[in-house]
Amino acid sequence: MDYRPGDHVLGRGTLRRMNLRKLGKTGMEVSEVGYGAWGIGGTMWLGAEDQESLQALRRAMDLGLNFIDTAAGYGDGHSERLVGQAVRARDEHVHVATKIPPKNRQWPAPSGIDPDEAFPAEHVIASTEQSLRTTGLDVLDVQQFHVWSDDWVGRGSWQEAIERLKSEGKIRAFGVSINDHQAANGVKLVESGVVDTVQVIYNVFDQSPEDALLPACAEHGVGVLARVPFDEGSLTGRIGPDTTFPDRDFRERYFRDDRLGQVDEHVRAILEDLGIERDDLAEVALRYILSNPAVSTVIPGMRSVPNVERNIAAGDGNGLPAETVEKLKRHRWERNFYA
């Protein structure tokens, strides 16, 4: 029998503990639904207001969310500051992950460059110490590189810096954010045993992590942070051929030309295949990701309380029936709208 969404929606006054999963072998347990804090940085995603962002963060933590992913590059530290402000006010521990921008400021990592061009030891240490100051936290639960190339495994000075930061108690775990739509460009690192977590684009359209990365992470005890679960909005059911975006919002470029029409065609196919309504799509998209046991947490971007409440409803430990997952596998769609 197919899964019918909507049975687990949280009432606004309802408080509950979200289901927790192990973050690989780190010893940390994190909420199935985490908080992706790119959108609250105030750049590229336009329209975020700080008070609304703080309300959303607080509501998420009230509902049991205990994992937030940010980055030094999100609004030049603005997201880190908001996250730190919200987390420091809590009595319970909330796990914070952030990211170090590459020193050469190149996204994604170009092939063939020396790792010390992107993450020399002094840059790794200085950036981490800056993030500690920006957030006001004593330790970062996960420190990540914001780009990655598997060519860097066993090369460069970055590994010494990570070991030093761990020994000094400034970070608890080390991870990388794998380049957009390059899930296989992290398997070698996972197999090396050096990394604690990987962050990767994983959604109904981009199922490529299932090919090699997620099995490798499961085998080696590496935590998985699944980002872009809604394909920048495509899988929310709220984007159609006539959708417009504010000037300078990065989605103007992401969905340029005839891409909105392409998205609508693929979304309609999913709705018809599963027999669901558009309003159900976001929940199904989250539960598809959480149906894979290799995933530690999924980190949708959330900038408002209604978004928080809607997304957190999926973090109750219930995935999708196997037959629904198999239907969604037919909707894999390989393309790169970031290009």
Image: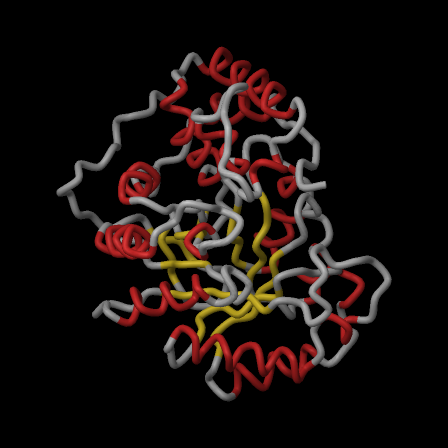
Foreground residue among 266 and 287? 266
Q: Quadrant of residue 109?
A: bottom right
Q: Is residue 190 left or right of residue 149?
A: left
| Residue 190 screen position, x and y as percent | 66, 60
Q: Residue at x 33, y 59 (%)?
A: 66
| Residue 264 screen position, x and y as percent | 55, 19
Indicate the quadrant containing the C terminus: top left, top right, bottom left or bottom right: top right
Does residue 328 appear in this view?
A: yes
Foreground residue among 221 and 281? 281
Foreground residue among 306 and 296? 306
Q: Residue furthest front?
A: 247
Q: Residue furthest right?
A: 112
Q: Residue at x 62, y 47 (%)?
A: 215
In the figure, 13 relative to 114: above or below?
A: above
Does residue 1 appear in this view?
A: no
| Residue 305 screen position, x and y as percent | 27, 44
Indicate the quadrant containing the N terminus: top left, top right, bottom left or bottom right: top left
Q: Quadrant of residue 219?
A: bottom right
Q: How is the image coloured?
A: secondary structure
Q: Is residue 107 left or right of residue 14?
A: right
Q: Residue at x 50, y 48 (%)?
A: 295
In the figure, 62 relative to 86: above or below?
A: above
| Residue 24 screen position, x and y as percent | 50, 60
In the figure, 175 relative to 129: above or below?
A: above
